[in-house]
Image (cartoon, grey):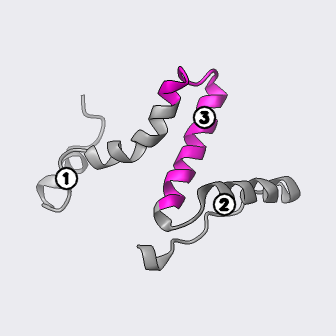
Amino acid sequence: MLRRPGDQAFTFLGYPAIPFENNHAARQIRPAVIPRKDGQSNRSERGALTQAVLMSVYRTLRPRGQDPLGTIAAALRSYLQTGQLPPLPPADTANG
């Protein structure tokens, strides 16, 4: 059953540049799914949420030309000092 309004679910019909499938999105998250699968899943709901957030940040930073591990480590250091997470760094315009 479609849970979205029809005009949004079928946007690809009016815009040829929009694919009708989500293979690109599936390929983008696959590197995050494989380690989870190899490790016999997450062991708790909190662990699953933590992994989802970290993988989302990681998969956002990498195409932006940022160092994901360094950026996450710096964000955690900042959080421990200030109690607030910093925003994601801006996209590197040279890399898209």
Of the two numbered discs 2 and 1 on the same chain, state the one appearing first in sequence.
1
Task: Answer few, some or many: residues within 10 Å of disc 2's Cα (few below 14, many 20 plus, some between 14 and 19).
Answer: some
Q: Nearer the viewer, residue 1 or 17?
A: 17
> x, y percentage for residue 59?
49, 52
User: In the image, is residue 46 above or below residue 14?
Assistant: above
Q: Does residue 14 sit above or below 6 in this rendering?
A: below
- Secondary structure state at the residue bearing disc 3: helix
Q: Position of residue 9 (x, y in %)?
A: 23, 45
- Point out the stretch of residues depicted in magenta: 36-62
Front residue of this view, candidates 78 and 18: 78
Closer to us: mark 3 or mark 2?
Answer: 2
User: What type is the residue that disc 1 sits on?
Assistant: Pro
Q: Residue at x 85, y 59 (%)?
A: 82
The local secondary structure at tag 2 comes to: helix
Q: Which residue is mark 3?
A: 49
> Along the horizontal axis of the image, is 8 left or right of 39?
left
Residue sitting at 17 percent across and 48 percent down?
Answer: 20
Residue 36, x across and y down, in percent? 52, 30
Residue at the spot 76% in from the left edge and 53% down from the top edge: 76
| Marks 1 and 3, how far apart at CA | 29 Å
Label 1 crowding class (10 Å Cα cut-off): few <14, some 14-19, many 20+?
Answer: few
Measure the alpha-carbon separation of dots 2 and 1.
32 Å
Q: CA distance from mark 3 to mark 2?
A: 19 Å
Q: Residue at x 20, y 57 (%)?
A: 18
Quadrant housing the C terminus: bottom left
Q: Which image quadrant for residue 43? A: top right
Which residue bears the numbered disc 1?
A: 19
Quadrant where the N terminus lies?
Answer: top left
Which mark sits nearer the N-terminus, 3 or 2?
A: 3
Name the residue type under label 2: Thr
Mark 2 or 1, which is nearer the eye? 2
Q: Which residue is mark 2?
A: 71
